[in-house]
Image: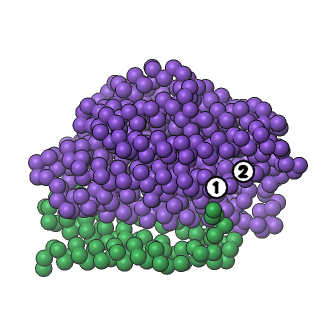
Amino acid sequence: MIEAPDLSLSALSPFLFVFGAALVGVLVESFAPRHVRQPTQVALALVGTVGGFACTLLLAGRGEVTAAGALAVDGAGLFLQATIAGLGALSVLLFAERALDPARSAFVASAAVPAGSPRDRELLTDERVQTEVYPLATFAVGGMMLFVAANDLLVMFIALEVLSLPLYLICGLSRRRRLLSQEAAVKYFLLGAFASAFFLYGLALVYGATGTVRLAGIRESVTTDGTGTLLVLGLGLLVVGLMFKASVAPFHTWTPDVYQGAPTPVTAFMAACTKVAAFGAVLRLLYVAFGTADWTWRPLVYGIAIVSMVVGAVLGLTQTDVKRMLAYSSIAHAGFLLTGVIGLGAGTGSGLAATLFYLLAYGLTTLGAFAVVTLVRDGDGEATQLSQWAGLARRSPLTAAIMTFLLLALAGIPLTSGFTGKFAVFRAAIEVGAWPLAVVALVTSAVAGFFYLRLVVLMYFSDPAEDGPSVGVPGLPTTVVLAVTVAATLVLGVVPGSVLDLADGAARLVG
Amino acid sequence: MSLTNYLVLAAILFTVGAVGVLVRRNAIVVFMCIELMLNSVNLTLVTFARSTGTLDGQVIAFFVMVVAAAEVVVGLAIIMSIYRTRRSASVDDANLLKY
């Protein structure tokens, strides 16, 4: 007789909510009349993500393995799931903004119409909007939440694809500059599929070495039988696959192109949520499966942390586009996050809690920064050239002030969440004796600080160009996003105690 | 025949695929090379399933096939959309995004 696997529906409720909303969204897209789709889809996506967020909060404090061992419900997983769902809901609000662009939406009216054709020009200012992006984004949020809870390499792979495939598509759906957007989608897709092939080969080698794909099983095998060449090789390939998603140098080559080409709300979504999800999976793989043999991954992670910080900070200096600059900033931040991963001590270090806090703080700040980018526009859509931002403070003091604050947070200036986060991850690295890494991190922080401050100086102390961009008046959705992200960045910087305690309490991985 | 032969064959196929991704210029051919990599992983999985005496590897191979099919749908849609505009699927022609 076959026994049904144990399945705790309450533990699965966040996934049921998010995937349920996405599936209903597909039905709405197929059967609802066009004019009701936009409000219905936005509402559905918000219900899904906010519902998923609420469910993870209700589950707080649980620690169990369910679904026949495939899913881990634990403090760290739930903290990251709540972060992803919350940031996902804010991104959906950015997607829904219709007041800024005269073209009424950031997304193309009909993706099947060739870019630049007469029909395409006609549709540019059409009232019609694409609403497929909402179910696709909801699927991506669901995949990300599954990614951080996967207790099994197979589930991790499936979740990786569930989060990636919708992202490839929505990268290519920009309404303006469609060629750039499609190019970004092709690059992201080809490199993403390449990276998932590496992840999969790593999975196969680890399976061959240990005879299982369960993280707990791998841990047991590593502890009793030791590590062989096959296993270390497999782990290396798995890490490559995950680091690609986390946009860590030297696997970052797609990041600037895709961040620049994708519609800005999608870039915000990717920068915030994908980063959290990828680091969640990295933490779970390294800590749960390979925590007892940390010599296998520590030198590798140590090396790529340094490469990522240096590449992000140095190449960020040479950028002339705001979105590309923020992309290199995201690569540098991935390196800072890896210093927290190095601080993952065997049960003692504060690395896990520090990384969780940093992910939350960075996600909120970067989402806000990209939201500001959607405001600055000229006749051709968003004005992302750095030179166009000159003298922005005179045109719109409030926008410039918000951007300055968020940039200072990205640079890690005290009284912002960036400082608290950096302090926490550097301390975790020093606690385990990785002080050279902390020194490199401090130096690269200073270098990266230069390019953030350069934009601030440009906004405040340059004369505005004659034909410079104007600052759009945001509708309710973007205003909400800006208010939430700025408030959170400030609160996490001034009084971080309660959230740090929360992250500390949540820093537990089962499996 | 020893199972090692299958593993070596799979490793060779994976390498051929990976090199193909890096050197070929047509997006469709690059994509075919990625499929070759996924299929070499399937061969590895099935071989390990036999050598470890567990069924997991064979089951995972099915999952990989389904994921590869989904990837084809998404990938070809994206490549088609760019081909319609540019009349070319070469990854070298797609060069608007750079420093």
- A40 w.r.t. B92: above or below: above
On the question of residue A4 being in view, the answer is yes
Residue at 27 percent of width and 71 percent of height: B43
Chain for numbered disc 2: A
Q: Residues within 10 Å of mark 1 (few under 14, many from 20)?
A: some
Q: Which mark is residue A319?
A: 1
The answer to whether mark 1 and mark 2 are in CB contact below 8 A is: yes
Same chain for labels 1 and 2? Say yes or no: yes
- Mark 1–mark 2 Cα distance, whole angstroms, equals 8 Å
Type of amino acid under label 2: Leu
Chain for numbered disc 1: A
Give x and y (percent) for residue A403. 68, 37
Give x and y (percent) for residue A117. 77, 68
Picture quadrant where residue A505 is located:
top left
Type of amino acid under label 1: Gln
- Chain that is coloured green in the picture: B
- Chain that is coloured purple in the picture: A
Name the quarter where the C terminus of chain A is drawn. top left
Q: Secondary structure at mark 1?
A: loop
Per the image, the residue denoted by label 2 is A386
- A468 w.r.t. A404: above or below: below
Outermost residue toward the left in this view: A224
